[in-house]
């Protein structure tokens, strides 16, 4: 136990520091590079590559250096990385990076260089620890030295606690500067702990290689590929499940923490000193979860409780794959190579989902693909007795059926769809017939993992291709880094409308058909094709921003966030509207008159500037009479656009007497208290307007909205009260601080009753 304790603590702290530094580094570079896809992809590649370099170095240390040299080199490596790389934004080199980025040179190369200078060496040094500590412990002569992988479980427990601690404890209470200082102290303590482990890790009297029961056997190519697959599939499932839930079911801030916590927990369970890895039982449970889950995915079921179903299926799949992976771990001499392949597999799964899939697929197809791959990796269900040669069961067991049966399921699904889709009315009965029968046929093959997986893939594919469960007319499906965007056609409605001068008697008015722009289950824009010049949803003429746009007509207007370009409907001749939009797919959709015509038909001159608004707006000429910030309605709000520094930049672009209007309608976050503190920090005055909807307005396309307006003085903001008396001053809330580039607290703004 005395020997085991320092190794456990070192593994725990090493992984905790590794997990905490990732969001810390990302927050440090966000104001410089913005939140464009290339930035997040580049950051992901950097961390994945650094982790792989660390595991490769661990393998080289273990195989090329003597045990004594290893125990000297690794603690020295940690100390050197701490002394040479300051985790801060205020170095001369980081200032040079900021200057280059401000001049328009914020490419991926500059980003990688910034991350390398910021955290590169410590991140690699930390990555070396886990496999190397296991190697040292295996040669220590301890009673449990033959199975040092429990240290990996301890490391993942550290990662799990760090993951939960960052949004719950660290971010709300510490500025980035304090976080960096605390992290450096932690790294120093870790270096001392690793040094202590190095002193304690003396080679045993009987080296591990001399134990006759565990002779060294090189892993075959097939085994290495299997390690890659067993690590890649849960990694892809993690990202696919997270994206699906946060887009299509519950776009709740920080919800991504839950699946990642479950993912880390599976490592703790399977690599613990007394592992809990009932892989055969999990392999039996998984089909009972994934088959009904496939039907719910095809049905696009989006009730919040469905999120629990997705998480349960993901947890069982990841636990099963990692359990198999743990059981196939080699003896101590092969562990560093084993962890290298596990790390590479995890990286490949992540890169496939985050970088490759958005290019290949228009939908979140990588999620069903990962579910199918997990089904194919299931351990086979053992039979009590073998099938007799020549029997039907024996023919069922042939490898040919592994391909033939899924093809038959696909053929049956196609035939059913062609025969019944037009005969049965749209609804649950048709959906369950056309999806349920192929899914049931897939379930019949659960005793053969490959066959079951391929048949499940057929049950996914055919109904998806024929849009069996579609409840509307899908005009377009296109995907970007930010998610899947769909344009859907809604039918027309006849609404009873009350108008003055008609004795308050209603008359029927036809609205629609409508074209809607959706991201997951969130509507980001709508146009009434029978009244195409009317702005709808949050931008309705009787709403807060509708009143501003109808009564205040500056020559130049800046709008951050494009949507479908609804506010362009208020443009007048002689005005200039500059939209700042980060998503190129949204831009293409809004500019295509087949779907939306607000931009084409606007009487104002309209220009769309593509890129992160904090960077692109900072390069714009000042003098905007109205600046509309409309980027905070989704679950993943761009924090760097809500900081005091960002608003100071926005204020520098505002003309004298101008107004800043901020759209903060959000199902889960109340940003009003944060904005009033931001306004006070900059010497601005702020008012808010939370708008409701009448029944006829809702049917016509209006959506309830929440807006905050800011101006330099009470005199400049006073016209809003003349437009609508609902505009009112904002009460401050105790304990709320303005967000800055050095501090934010998303959890503190969480308010699900919004």
Image: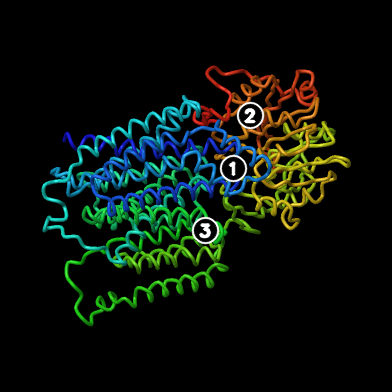
For mark 1, does the 10 Å Cα neighbourhood hold few (<14), some (14 to 19), or many (20 or more) residues?
A: many
In the drawing, does residue 213 fall left or right of residue 217?
left
For mark 2, does the 10 Å Cα neighbourhood hold few (<14), some (14 to 19), or many (20 or more) residues?
A: some
Q: Is residue 7 above or below residue 484?
A: above
Q: Quadrant of the C terminus?
A: top right
Contact between marks 1 and 2 (CB within 8 A): the answer is: no
Pinpoint residue 417: horizontal percent, then vertical percent.
Answer: 52, 69
Residue at the farthest bottom position:
390
Q: Is there any visible trace of residue 280 in the rendered image?
A: no
For mark 3, does the 10 Å Cα neighbourhood hold few (<14), some (14 to 19), or many (20 or more) residues?
A: few
Cα separation between marks 3 and 1: 19 Å
The label number, if any, that marks residue 645 in the structure image: 2
Who's the residue at 63% across and 22% down the image? 676
Residue 79: quadrant of the picture: top left
Q: Mark 3 or mark 2: which comes first in sequence?
A: 3
Cα separation between marks 1 and 2: 16 Å
In the drawing, does residue 621 fall left or right of residue 23?
right
Between 229 and 54, the residue placed more toward the observer is: 54
Q: Is residue 348 above or below residue 204?
A: below
Q: Which residue is mark 1?
A: 35
Q: Is there any visible trace of residue 534 in the rendered image?
A: yes
Between 679 and 51, the residue placed more toward the observer is: 51
Q: Regarding mark 3 in the picture, which secondary structure is present there?
A: helix
Between 240 and 311, the residue placed more toward the observer is: 240
The label number, if any, that marks residue 13 in the structure image: none
Pinpoint residue 380: horizontal percent, then vertical percent.
Answer: 26, 64
Residue at the farthest right position:
574
Q: Regarding mark 1 in the picture, which secondary structure is present there?
A: loop
Pinpoint residue 37: horizontal percent, then vertical percent.
Answer: 58, 48
Q: Which residue is mark 3?
A: 356
Viewer-side label of 3, 2: 2
Q: Regarding mark 2 in the picture, which secondary structure is present there?
A: helix
């Amino acid at each position: 136990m005395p020997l085991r304790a320092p190794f456990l603590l070192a593994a725990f702290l090493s992984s905790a520091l590794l997990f905490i530094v990732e969001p810390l580094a990302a927050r440090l570079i966000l104001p410089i590079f913005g939140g464009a896809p290339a930035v997040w992809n580049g950051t992901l590649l950097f961390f994945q590559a650094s982790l792989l370099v660390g595991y490769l170095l661990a393998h080289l240390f273990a195989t090329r250096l003597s045990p004594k040299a290893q125990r000297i080199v690794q603690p020295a490596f940690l100390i050197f990385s701490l002394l040479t790389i300051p985790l801060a934004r205020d170095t001369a080199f980081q200032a040079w990076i900021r200057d280059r980025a401000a001049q328009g040179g914020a490419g991926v190369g500059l980003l990688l260089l910034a991350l390398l200078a910021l955290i590169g060496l410590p991140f690699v040094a930390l990555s070396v620890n886990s496999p190397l500590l296991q190697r040292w412990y295996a040669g220590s002569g301890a009673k449990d030295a033959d199975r040092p992988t429990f240290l990996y479980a301890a490391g993942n427990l550290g990662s799990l606690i760090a993951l939960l601690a960052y949004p719950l404890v660290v971010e709300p209470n510490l500025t980035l500067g304090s976080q960096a200082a605390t992290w450096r102290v932690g790294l120093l303590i870790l270096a001392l702990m690793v040094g202590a482990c190095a002193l304690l890790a003396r080679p045993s009297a009987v080296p591990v290689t001399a134990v006759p029961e565990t002779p060294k056997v090189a892993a075959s190519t097939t085994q290495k590929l299997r390690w890659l697959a067993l690590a890649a599939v849960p990694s892809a499932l993690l990202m696919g499940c997270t994206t699906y839930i946060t887009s299509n079911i519950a776009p709740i801030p920080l919800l991504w923490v839950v699946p990642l916590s479950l993912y880390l927990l599976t490592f703790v369970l399977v690599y613990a000193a007394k592992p809990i890895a009932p892989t055969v039982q999990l392999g039996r449970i998984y089909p009972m979860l994934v088959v009904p889950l496939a039907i719910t995915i095809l049905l696009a079921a989006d009730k919040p409780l469905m999120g629990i179903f997705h998480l349960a299926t993901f947890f069982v799949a990841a636990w099963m794959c990692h359990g198999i992976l743990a059981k196939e771990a080699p003896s101590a001499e092969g562990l560093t190579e084993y962890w290298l392949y596990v790390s590479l597999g995890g990286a490949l799964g992540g890169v496939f989902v985050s970088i490759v899939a958005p290019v290949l697929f228009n939908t979140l197809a990588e999620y069903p693909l990962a579910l199918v791959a997990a089904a194919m990796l299931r351990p086979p269900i053992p039979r009590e007795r073998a099938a007799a040669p020549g029997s039907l069961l024996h023919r069922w067991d042939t490898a040919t059926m592994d391909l033939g049966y899924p093809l038959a399921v696909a053929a049956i699904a196609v035939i059913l769809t062609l025969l019944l889709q037009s005969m049965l009315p749209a609804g649950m009965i048709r959906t369950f017939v056309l999806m349920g029968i192929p899914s049931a046929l897939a379930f019949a093959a659960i005793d053969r993992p490959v066959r079951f997986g391929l048949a499940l893939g057929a049950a996914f594919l055919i109904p998806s291709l024929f849009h069996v469960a579609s409840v509307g007319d899908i005009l377009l499906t296109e995907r970007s880094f930010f998610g899947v965007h769909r344009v859907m056609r809604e039918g027309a409605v006849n609404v009873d409308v009350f108008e003055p001068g008609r004795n308050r008697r209603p008359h029927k008015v036809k609205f629609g058909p409508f074209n809607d722009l959706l991201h997951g289950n969130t509507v980001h824009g709508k146009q009434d094709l029978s009244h195409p010049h009317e702005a709808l949803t949050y931008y309705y003429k009787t709403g807060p921003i509708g009143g501003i746009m109808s009564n205040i007509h500056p020559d130049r207007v800046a709008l951050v966030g494009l949507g479908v370009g609804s506010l362009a409907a208020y443009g007048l001749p002689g005005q200039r509207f500059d939209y700042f939009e980060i998503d190129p797919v949204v831009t293409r959709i809004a500019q295509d008159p087949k779907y939306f015509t607000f931009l084409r038909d606007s009487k104002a001159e309209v220009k769309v500037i593509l890129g992160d608004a904090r960077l692109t707006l900072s390069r714009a000429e000042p003098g905007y009479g109205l600046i509309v910030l409309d980027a905070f309605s989704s679950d993943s709000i761009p924090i760097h656009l809500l900081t005091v520094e960002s608003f100071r930049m926005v204020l520098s672009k505002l003309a004298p007497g101008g107004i800043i209007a901020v759209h903060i309608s959000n199902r889960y976050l109340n940003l009003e208290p944060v904005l009033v503190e931001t306004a006070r920090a900059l010497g601005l005055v702020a008012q808010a307007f939370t708008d409701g909807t009448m029944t006829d307005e809702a049917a016509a396309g209006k959506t309830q909205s929440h807006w905050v307006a800011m101006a330099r003085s009470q005199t400049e903001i006073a016209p809003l009260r003349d437009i609508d008396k609902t505009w009112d001053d904002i009460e401050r809330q105790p304990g709320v601080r303005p967000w800055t580039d050095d501090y934010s607290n998303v959890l503190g703004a969480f308010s699900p009753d919004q």
